[in-house]
Image (cartoon, grey):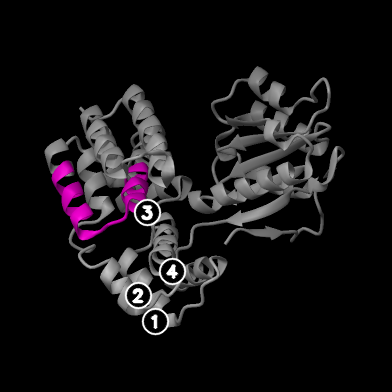
Amino acid sequence: MCIRSDRHGTIGAVNANNPAVESLHLVLGDEELLMDRAVAQIVARVRAAAPGAEDLPVTKLRTGDASAPELLELLSPSLFAEDRVGGLEAAAEAGKDAVALVLDAAADPPEGAVLVIMHSGGGRAKAMVGALQKAGAVTHECAKLTKPAERVDFVRREFSAAGVRVGGDVVEAVVDAVGSELRELAAACSQLVADTGGKVDVAAVGRYYSGKAEVSGFDVADRAVAGDRPGALEALRWAMHRGVPHVLLADALADAVRTIALVGSAGRGDPFAMASELGMPPWKIKKAQAQARGWTGQSIGRALCVVSQLNADVKGQAADADYAVENAVSVVAGLSN
């Protein structure tokens, strides 16, 4: 879980316009699901306490790619000092000048602004973490859950957050059936609660995930990003027949595309040397390096848009979720050369 931490004995300076919300936050780690949730919680707090919340500006920049003028615009006080949230992603990749701009703003946050800085904890800007914590940033720990016991605890908390009490055998069954990906685990818990009316037992887990081992969302995604459209669509239809949830299929496709984007942008290199910086195991990097050969920056950008739309579609925007998933898989497979 993402945990607010004040380990350094300081609480972030409050937003002058909104004293209920601290003005400086550090989302620390490399687990995307936990980071997304931490940011969403911060934005929700600001919106809950701010007047005219529906118009609250939320701006995000990728720190390593943003120009100095873009950073200055985000980090400088606005003319009317209105409430706003500024998010800086991938701060670990920031260069020297960008780091200086961020730390200057952290020392004296713009009036009315809440700054949310997302940092993996490593990278060339590793020293930024300590500086931000010294400046009073509220730290939200979002490290990857690498131990089986941590994933078991995560699943237990997911059910608890949904208001459902389950035994340890149910939790173990979910982890065994679904695997180690947190997005899949979270989606599985949500789907099981919805489909059983909160009466989740081992038998329900077994019924729901029977056949998942034969064809999973990751099987479909691997074929899609490899450009094997017929194979991807065949695997997809079999997965749907076996009852793999739309949200798990969508998450697997998104994970495959994002991994290729991340590994592709890092360039060629030794997977073992790159593992720490990218926050993923060497085998996954090696696999993505091979897959990335069929992709260009333009096609990756298009694929990221496709999986982003699919995420919204499977969560209720699309009238036909089956078609939405099949179309997204087909489009992504067609983008790989």
Marks 3 and 4, how far apart at CA? 37 Å
Circle count: 4
Magenta stretch, overall SS = helix
| Type of the residue with mark 2 | Ala
Question: Residue 200 has which mark?
Answer: none
Q: Which residues are magenta?
A: 233-255
Marked residue nearer the N-terminal end (3 or 1):
1
Say what secondary structure mark 2 lies in: helix
Residue 118 image point, x, y percent: 60, 43
Marked residue nearer the N-terminal end (2 or 4):
2
| Type of the residue with mark 1 | Asp
Marked residue nearer the N-terminal end (3 or 4):
4
Marks 2 and 4, how far apart at CA? 18 Å
Question: Callout 3 environment at 10 Å: few (<14), some (14 to 19), or many (20+)?
Answer: few
Say what secondary structure mark 3 lies in: loop
Is residue 27 inside the magenta stretch? no
Say what secondary structure mark 1 lies in: helix
Read off the residue under disc 3: 281
| Type of the residue with mark 3 | Pro
Question: Do callouts 1 and 4 mark residues in contact (Cβ within 8 Å)?
Answer: no
The relative height of residue 175 versus residue 20 in the rendered view (above or below) is below
Residue 47 occupies quadrant: top right
Write the residue at 44% across / 45% down. Answer: 278
